Amino acid sequence: MSSSNIITVVLAEDHSIVREGLRALLQAEADLEVVGEAANGREAVELAQKLHPTVIVMDIAMPLLNGLEATRQISKTAPATRILILSAHSDDAYVEQVIALGGAGFLIKQTVADVLPKAIREIAKGNTFFSPSIAKRLDQRNKRSTNRTGTFKTGAVELTSREVEVLQLIAEGKANKETAGELGIGIKTVEKHREHLMEKLDIHHTAGLTRYAISAGIIESSVQLTII
């Protein structure tokens, strides 16, 4: 098969055994090539910018940077790359965020083996692809209009990309110094972002920010086990 017909794929999933299973599934397809793997959202953003894959298969719940925020950043910095979200959860809030942030499809993990190659091919063509149960709900809701304002909307509050990054790292238990090092910014800047988050959300302690991050789908409850 001509290299021009090959669909290049990056797998973004923090569980190595799941990545191995996905890679094995795709390697059986002559027109699909896995060119990179990421264990967190930040690595996915970097690989998108470096490799310019046709498609990124993206988990939502990943450390350091979740799949939703990674999707937003990739949609801005590597807009030609199409993003297919995988998740064990298919809540409407997740699906709406994926669409709003530039994702091209959403698959429930339990059904991946049956439809993943087909989904990748469809979104590589410029189409969208959703697991059947999600597609049915979207049709019933008349594909409600979404926005791409560059903000992460959680209820009535909109957070900037940097605020989401800081919030996730706070919720993962990172201190200001660790957060600064991870994001390549100063500690004072981290403190300012923390202050802005508390003001926007009207939450004034770390445990509250962590609970908010969980409720907004920025991290999963299993990521942070020391909530007081």
Image: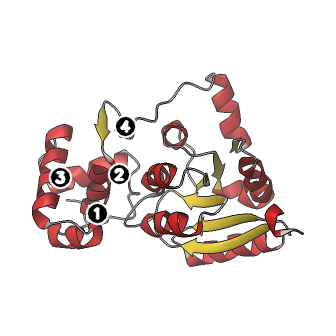
Q: Is residue 197 above or below residue 207?
A: above
Whether residue 174 appears in this view of the structure is no
- Please report whichever mark, 2 or 1, sits nearer to the chain's N-terminal start: 1
Q: Which residue is mark 3?
A: 193
Q: Is residue 153 above or below residue 83?
A: above
Residue 106: image location, x then y, percent? 63, 47
The reply to whether the C-beta atoms of the residues labelled 3 and 1 are less than 8 Å apart is no
103 relative to 149 in the view: left or right:
right
- Helix, strand or loop status at disc 1: helix
Amino acid marked by disc 3: His
The numbered dot on residue 153 is 4
Q: Nearer the viewer, residue 196 or 79?
A: 79
The residue located at (64%, 30%) in the rendering is 138
Q: Which residue is mark 2?
A: 214
Residue 153: image location, x then y, percent? 37, 37
Amino acid marked by disc 1: Leu
Nearer to us of marks 3 and 1 is 3
Whether residue 106 appears in this view of the structure is yes
Q: Which residue is mark 1?
A: 169
35 relative to 122 in the view: left or right:
left
Amino acid marked by disc 2: Ile
- Please report whichever mark, 3 or 1, sits nearer to the chain's N-terminal start: 1
In three-dimensional space, the C-alpha distance between marks 1 and 4, rounded to whole angstroms, equals 18 Å
The residue located at (46%, 56%) in the rendering is 70
In three-dimensional space, the C-alpha distance between marks 4 and 3, rounded to whole angstroms, equals 17 Å
- Please report whichever mark, 2 or 4, sits nearer to the chain's N-terminal start: 4
